Amino acid sequence: MKRFSAILISLVFVSALMLSGCGELNRDKELKEIQKTTEGGLEDTFTEETCDFDLLVDYIESWARNADIKVADKTKHTIILFNPATKGHDSEESISLLCSVDPDRIQSELNVISTATTALMGSAKHGDITLAIVENKNGRMIGMEYLDYSKIKSDNLIQLQPSTSNTILTSGADNASCIFSSPAKTKKTDYAKAYEITMSMAKYTDPYNFVKESNYPNPINVIGSLLATERSSSKLFDIASFSYEGKSGYTPYSATAVVVIDNNHIDSFTKKFDKSFENLVDKFDKLEDDFVFTMTETDLPETVLRDNAANHIISLMYALNTGICLQDEESGIVNSTSYIKSISTDNEEFKLVIDIRARGEEYMDTLASEYEVTSGLCSTDYACKKGSRVWSAAKGSHLVDFFTEAVPLNEAEESDISIKTYETDMIAKELPKQNMIIYTFKKEERTKVILNITHFMKEN
């Protein structure tokens, strides 16, 4: 990556364009030139596939200084820029822009950075404009953990998201948490050899990303499937424990089961494990990532779960419908999804928690009812706590009306509800009344995105 001497010419050019503005008729043309010049400067500077986020922050800070934009806040994982209202327009609605950047794929992120920074320049006359650029490191929304949310609070917020389609998302999904539980009394085992089965992978993966090329398996499901397969083959083993490790809002990154196996069935169990391992190798080769999946002999536990408790676990692992649960056959739109959030056999109680997202109450009720039936078949207790929308824009607001008219849904999308996890999920927790949308866009449409945002500012 070239150092910042490479950007001085482009910064001076941007500053000159800002000073030369003479009304809205010329502003659109100026913004197009600014975007082109800004993106060119980024491409000349960030020539490698990856970079450190703090180098990007240094670049953006230099850019802001030359463009007469204030740096409102800066951390190792975030930078917030502020463009105050033009004279006489302090009372106009404020707007915040947000984009997340993965420095490990910086080359593909430059277009959203140039789009966001150019939109920050605003229309010729505008209210307060704020831009937050936050780091997303290998799936971890680490920038949102360090973000000062008070500095992005505004009348309107737009998250800019590169995509393969142009869409305005006005809401997250409905959310619910369902719990399967039963007593997990223990006994002495009749078998002689104990094994610890562990799977672990990247700590920060989105459980609601179902794009085949980037969807990670859930370690709880992987181990649960292995146990269910062996039990369905009438192999004899006891379960001593089943546990997980995970971060809130992400797929569990590790799961461990301790089993005690009949000597006559160790060979079969090992072969099934090897087959599972081979399948994971294929999966993670496509993900271009690492994982750990081991089956190692361990000390014999003092107690194991009684047969009925173990059967509850295995039955659920076999019967539970998780991942994409309801999907429209024609459009391919996912209407309800779920993932196993946690599993535990501590304190003589089996507890499995599932997180659900659905595009509406009808789909939520259908899946929750299915799980209630599954619970009855597996002889476990069941409770489902329905929550609210993960996040939602204010219906009928100028923000929603303007952008849904400017960017109509195309035939492939038929919904403005997002199942996938976005930074807006975390904003809603900190700023529950924040009016916001997600603007997904193709790279070739970035100029139109800038003009849509600045035209929105003009109408406020």
Image (cartoon, grey):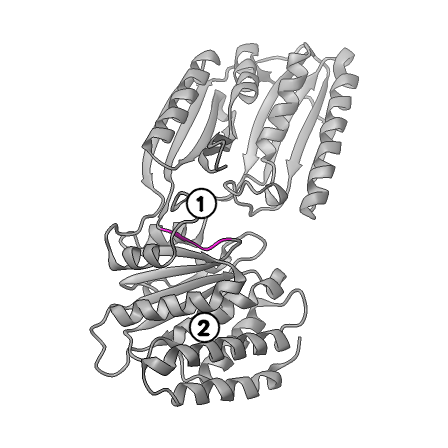
Answer yes or no: is residue 264 visible. yes
Q: Which residue is mark 2?
A: 117
The residue depicted at 47 percent of the width and 12 percent of the height is 377
Residue 278 vs 116, above or below: the answer is above
Tag 2, which secondary structure?
helix
Could you say which is closer to the camera, residue 212 or residue 357? 212
- Residue 207 in percent (x, y) is at 52, 40
Q: Quadrant of residue 304?
A: top right
Residues at discs 1 and 2 in contact (Cβ within 8 Å): no
Three-letter amino acid code at the position of disc 1: Glu
Question: Marks 1 and 2, Cα distance to the nearest angstrom?
Answer: 31 Å
- Location of the C terminus (image quadrant): bottom left
The residue depicted at 46 percent of the width and 32 percent of the height is 328
Q: Which residue is mark 1?
A: 411
The residue depicted at 46 percent of the width and 47 percent of the height is 421
Q: Is residue 341 magenta?
A: no
- Residue 195 in percent (x, y) is at 70, 25
The stretch of residues the image draws in magenta is 165-169
> Main SS of the magenta segment?
strand
